[in-house]
Each structure stands twice: as C-alpha cells, then as structure tokens.
Amino acid sequence: MRSLQTVAALTCMKTLLMIFNIVFWLSGIALLVLGVWLHVELHKYLELSPDFSATAPYVLVGTGILILFLATLACCCTIKEQPILLYIYAAFLAIVFVMEVSACISGYAYRTKLRASFSKGLNSSIGLYMTDHARTSAINSLQFHGCYALVTSFLTEKLGIMAASALGLAIFQLFGVLLTACLAKLLQKTKYEQMT
C-alpha cells in the first residue's frame, strides 16, 4: 500500500512540475518579447531620460532566454527523475527569482522618478536638437505620436504593469522551487525504499 501512495504522489508532483515548466517557458517567451518591444518601441523615448539604463531591454531578453533554456532543461530533469538535476534546477530557479525581484524593485523605484526624469531629459535634449541624431529622432517621434503628458502617462502605467507582472512571476517561481525540491526529495526517498 505504501508504494502505491508513493507512485500516486510522484505522478501528481511530476504532472504539477510539468505544468509549472510549461507556464514558466511561456513566461520566458513573454519576457523575451517584452525586452524586444522595449528595445524597439520604447527605447527612443526612454533615451530622453538621463536616468535610463540602455541595458534594461537586454536584461529582459537575456532573462527570457535563460528562462526558456531552464524550462526546457527542467522538462528533461522531470522526465529523467534524477534528484540531483532537480536540485540544480531549483537552485537556478532561485537565482532567476532573485533577478526578477531585483528587476521588479528597480522598475518600481524608477516609476516614481520617470515623469521628472523624462522632463529633465527632454529639456536637455531640445538643446541638442539637430546635433545629436538619436535625440533628434526621439523628439521627432515624440512630436509625431503625441504630447508629452500622453507619453509619460503611458510609460508610467506600463512600468507599473511590468513591475507587477515580474512580482507575480517571481512568486510563482517560489512555488516552482518548492515543488522541485519536494519532488527531488520524494525521488530520493523512493530510490532508498527500492534498495531496502
């Protein structure tokens, strides 16, 4: 009877972990798309802000690629049923969790400074109009797409949504770390029971 309970628990945990990995993989695609979108569409506006780091889109793209790789690797680890591989995967999930929480915190902190920083950058960019090609292009695009208030409110709203999404994903990953560690421990226990 005990082995039947163990088999049912293993099957349930493996199924939950595979579902988690699929959702995790989809979140990696979302981060990848968000990073590319931030680089292509919003980069020209954010360049007007002196506090903007040009590496932010690349961090999102890199994190998205890392998540895609880890989720694919996790599916293999789950199928192979190797506890050590699952523990390594849990450690990587914890590292990605820390990266996402730090990105969430910095995004949320930057959100409060966005309007003032954007205004300061726009004023300094107008002085460089027609001398700096990147800023000239950004100012022309800003004038074409609408007024300053519309753009800053749009950016403020989107940064809040991105920070909330990152926090939600990070909390979801904590569930993945716990699930992976529990599955690895159960697999170790099952292999030990088979030997005795």
Image (spheres, rainbow, N blue to C red):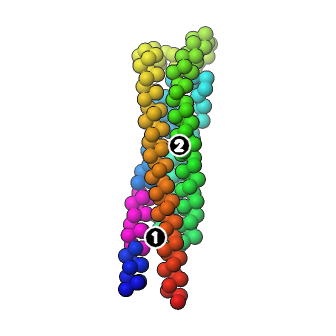
Q: Which mark is residue 185?
A: none
Instruction: Look at 51% across and 78% down and name the residue there.
Output: 189
Report the front residue among 23 and 177: 177
Location of residue 54 in the rendering, given as x and y in whole percent from the top left corner = 59, 32
Q: Which residues are magenta?
A: 10-22
Instruction: Look at 53% across and 43% down and name the residue there.
Output: 61
Which label's residue is closer to the chain start, 2 or 1?
A: 2
- Dominant SS type (magenta): helix
Q: Note whether 71 is above or below 163 in the view shown.
A: below
Residue occupying the far front of the picture: 2
Q: Secondary structure at mark 1?
A: helix
Disc 1 designates what residue? Answer: 79
Kind of residue at disc 1:
Ile
Location of residue 191 in the rendering, given as x and y in whole percent from the top left corner = 51, 81
Q: Is residue 120 left or right of residue 159?
A: right
Instruction: Look at 51% across and 52% down and name the residue there.
Output: 67
Q: Which quadrant is home to the N terminus?
A: bottom left
Q: Note whether 28 is above or below 157 in the view shown.
A: below
Location of residue 179 in the rendering, given as x and y in whole percent from the top left corner = 47, 63
Q: Is residue 147 left or right of residue 188?
A: left
Instruction: Classify 10 Å Cα crowding around label 2: few (below 14), some (14-19), many (20 and above).
Output: many
Q: Is residue 76 visible?
A: no
Report the front residue among 49 and 69: 49
Residue occupying the far top of the picture: 127
Instruction: Classify 10 Å Cα crowding around label 1: few (below 14), some (14-19), many (20 and above).
Output: few
Q: Which mark is residue 61?
A: 2
Q: Secondary structure at mark 2?
A: helix
- State yes or no: residue 16 in magenta: yes
Quadrant position of residue 100 = top right
Q: Is residue 165 visible?
A: yes
